[in-house]
Amino acid sequence: MKNVLIIGSTGQIGSELTMKLRRMLPEGTIVAGYIPGAEPKGELLESGPSAVVDVTNGAQIAETVEKYKIDTIYNLAALLSAVAERKPLMAWNIQMNGLINILEIAREKGCAVFTPSSIGSFGPETPHQNTPQDTIQRPRSMYGVTKVATELLSDYYHNKYGVDTRSVRFPGLISHITLPGGGTTDYAVEIFYAAVKGEEFVCPIAAGTYMDMMYMPDALQAAVDIMQADPTRLVHRNSFNIAAMSFEPETLRAAIAKRIPSFRMRYEVDPVRQAIADSWPDKMDDSCARAEWGWKPTFGLDEMVDDMILNLRKKLL
Ligand code: AKB
C-alpha cells in the first residue's frame, strides 16, 4: 500500500482514514475522492491531493487511478441503513454499481480494494449472541442486501480474477470528527453532542436494544491492518466480524450521566430504525479476525466515553 484512493473521503470514516494514511505513508500519495457538494475542507484539503470521484462514474475512478498510480482503493461511498430504506434504488446504485466499477478497474490495474461490510449484513434469523463469522445472512433492509452482495462480489473478484479484496464488518462507529448520516447506530454518536451541549437527548432506539459498537480509532486500525495482513494467513476475506463493545441505550446513558450528572434522555422510538436494530446481532464473535490477522480493539465503553466527552468539549464549547 503506497498510493491510495479514498472514495468517500469526506464521510465519517473517510475524513479520518485519509488523514491517518497521509501520516502513516508520507512517501505515498493519498487521494481524497469526493463528490460535488461534499468537498474536503481544512486539513483534509490542504494535506494532500483531492479529486472528484463519483463511485457511479467508472471513467472518473479510472482517470484518478491512472493519474496517481493508485495501488489500493478504499471504497467508503454508501448510503447508511436508515436512509437506504428511504432511497433503496439510490442505495443499490451507489453500493452495487459503484462497487462493480471499482472492481473492474482494480482487475485491470491490479489495485487492492477495501469495501466495508457491516453488522447490517445480518438479519433476523442470524444468531444474535456471539454471531459466528460464517452464519446465515438474510437481511431485510436494502442496506443489508447490498452489504451481503458486496461481500459476495468482492470474494468473486478475488476467486475468479485474483483481485486483492479484503474487508471487515463494521459495528456502529462512534467518532467526534465527522457525524455519520442516516445510520441505525447514529444515536450512539448524537447522544454525545446533546450531552456535551447540555441538551436532552431523544433516543430513537428502544431501551434494551443491544448492538455492537466501536470507537473510530479501532475501526481505522482495522481498515489498515486488514489491508496489510499477510495474505497467506487469510482463510476469510470478505468480510471479517470485528467487535469491540456491545451496549444498549440505557448503558450508554448511564455511562454519560456518570460524567455529566445533569444529562437527560427520553425515548421516541423510530419504527424503521428499531426494526433494523432488532434484526442485527447483539454481539459478534470476532475470533477469526483475531486469529487470521491479529485484530484486537483498544477502546472499551469507559475509554470511549471519556475520550468522546473530552474531544467534544474541545470542539463544541
Ligand atoms: C448503520 O447504522 O447503518 C451503520 C452500520 C452499522 O453499518 N452505522
Image (tube, grey):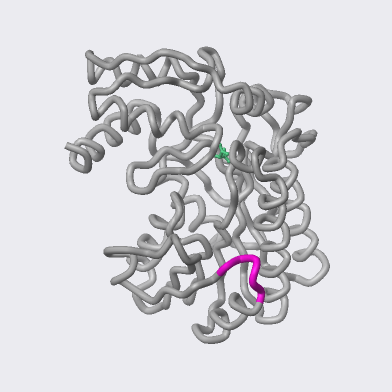
Q: Could you tell me which residue is drawn at 67 percent across and 42 percent down?
A: 143
Residue at the extreme bottom: 67
Q: Quadrant of the image for the C terminus?
A: top left
Does residue 125 appear to the left or right of 40 in the view shown?
right
Bounds of the magenta span?
Answer: 54-58
Residue 9 highlighted magenta (yes or no) = no
Among the 4 quarters of the image, the one containing residue 230: bottom right
Image position of 282 with respect to 47: above or below = above
Q: Could you tell me which residue is drawn at 27 percent across and 30 percent down?
A: 306
Task: Pick the residue in front: 127 or 198.
Answer: 198
Q: Could you tell me which residue is drawn at 55 percent across and 63 percent down?
A: 74
Q: Could you tell me which residue is drawn at 42 percent across and 38 percent down?
A: 174
Residue 287 lies, in percent from the top left, at 61, 37
Task: Pick the residue in front: 197 or 251.
Answer: 197
Residue at the extreme right: 160
Task: Pick the residue in front: 82 or 159.
Answer: 82
Query: Which quadrant contains ligand 1?
Result: top right
Image position of 118 with respect to 75: above or below = above
